[in-house]
Amino acid sequence: MIKALGYFIEIIKGSIITTRHFVVNMHFHILKVLGFKTKRKGAVTIQYPEQKREIASRHRSLHRLMKRADGKPRCVVCMLCVTVCPSECIYVEAAEDPDPEIQKYPSIFIIDLSRCCFCGFCVEACPEDALRMDTGKIEFAEYSREDMVYNLEKLIE
Amino acid sequence: MINIFIDDKPFKVKEGTTVLKAAEEAGIAIPHLCFHSAFPPEGSCRMCLVEIEGLPKLELACSTQVREGMKVSTRSEKVIEARKGVLEFLLAEHPPDCPICDKAGECKLQDYYEEYGLFDNRFRESKEKKQKNVKIGKSLILDQERCILCTRCVRFLRDITKTRELGVFNRGLHSEINTYNGEPVNNNYSGNLAEICPVGAITDSDFRFKTRNWFLKEGESICPLCSRGCNIYIESHKGFARFPVPKRVYRIKSRENHEVNGFWICDLGRYGYSYLDEGRLDKICVNNGKGNLTWQECVVSLTDEIKKLHSAKKASRIALILNLWLSNEELFLIKKIFVDDLGVKNIYFVDSSGGETDDFLLTSERCPNKRGAQEIGYDLKPLDSENLMNKTDLLLIFGMPAYDPNNLAEIKALFENVKTKIYFSSHSDELCSLADIVLPTALIPEKEGSLTNVDGIVQKFLQVLEAPGECRPEWEVFVDLGRELGININYYKQFNTPEVVLKEMRKEISFFENKSE
């Protein structure tokens, strides 16, 4: 009996919060319509998948590998991103490039996005500006974990 | 002994040493690039400049001898300024290759720049173009741009190997290290060049671009590939959380020990580490249809077999084929159990036949513990399968990475003749499918123990790698076996570590009595 009463109280509390949000936001919207300038704006619901907010210029999103002028990856496999990564989600393997000015290029470059915490340390550590997190892609949900592992071809496109 | 002052602190040092060595012994590091303790001082890099009271100019710490009452300062403003200047000139021609350079992380030039430099490049001239990828030996790649002309490599080939394959060519800005007429560096110690190069000018193609050196964990070990027992570092990679690396061991480096190998190791030991990862046996195989057995069950069934033969007074029908990769402790335990307790006489040794020797480090015996086996009291009989045919019921055989193919055929023929065959092996090979029980064993870096080298120096080694799968060190198995057999149970109860076994050996065998390390 007392337990049921407890639920009932919580329902009332919840309704009060909802009502308060409605009244407060409505109040600010009405003030705006009437031409009053207020510090706080009334909240607006964005219809997310159809309607998208603009992403801040300093945001961090899906990684991309940069290319040299001739299309080869800019990465020289110094492995600083691998070293600094706190979630150990990057794996790189090097191969020897015939060009003595390049010498080292990535034969494998994998980022396991299911582990990535988007701290951006890899981008900060990169001495060649080969890795950036500015694609603006923030939606990359997949049905399997394997699909979350991005390889060189996927990262460089 | 004379008194000197380094950075205002008094020290007593040996007469005749240099300032650099005296400071090093006192725990004060003086930066140096061209100086290496193995060679006489060269004084070409000018990094070790120190201020000595009473002398008008800065002096080279590597070549200045200590004098009574000498006052050296290694951290004065003048010295720091001089180091900065030297670094600036060295880096004027040194390319900023650190991201692709294998030496980055253990490069002395990089370390000193972090410590004393940290300036911006003031030179407007472009850097001198030189060859970046010259193959100067079997596994050596020279980058002339990175070279700071310390000539350590030239001096190594001049003083240590005396083969003189490298030299300094041209003058001034155009000076470069190269081979004479393209003759490559071709000696058994070439791998040391990549190790002593203070920068990344000479890199090792065996290690080149495989990984970065800060991922590697250094473990002190002993090289088992010949009876010299050179002291080495085994550098292994533990892998990343989600991505296992293709192998454990990436590099072998020499470890300083003036009694054994000095600063150097040979190429055979440096590059011959693939046996640690390739073809390893990591599971117990039971081929006699008894299903899957654990180690304990295997030891028990082996004990039962031995007990049966022992109680029927048929211990002479037990035969052992040993190898010389077993440690002193293991050979001692085998002797105690099988020779002293059971009275087994058929103990044979198989080993890969000897190889070439080179009068420096590499010996002709390609096994680490021949001397140890001799001193423990084995007479090292080579395998005599005719003597064993039809006279053997139980055969214990110890495999090892380097088998002599002749022995292999002989053992195979013998196998058809013997009732029970127990095979201890670290690697899976042809014998694994023929033996009744195959037990995986640990290799030398995966266990503890000691080895006796060709000169009779007893060297301890510690575990530096995880043993894969079900692999177990042999000494553990023998201690278990000794306890299970119950002939001398209290004697084997004391052996918890190889160290206790060695202590017991010191009591019983006079050769080991006075061997400290």
Image: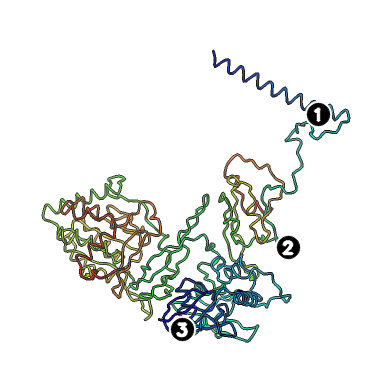
SS label for mark 2: loop
Q: Is residue B294 left or right of residue B263?
A: left
Q: Are marks 3 and 2 in contact (CB under 8 Å)?
A: no
Nearest the camera: B35 or A126? B35
What is the three-letter code of the residue carrying label 1?
Phe
What residue is disc 1 on?
A: A28
What is the three-letter code of the residue carrying label 3?
Glu
Q: How is the image coloured?
A: rainbow
SS label for mark 1: helix
Q: Quick check: A82 above or below B47? A: above
What is the chain letter for disc 3?
Answer: B
Q: Quick check: B93 above or below A138? A: below
Instruction: Give the CA separation, mark 2 to mark 1.
Output: 53 Å
- The image shows residue B283 at horizontal and vertical percentages of 36, 51
What is the chain letter for disc 1?
Answer: A
What residue is disc 2 on?
A: A69
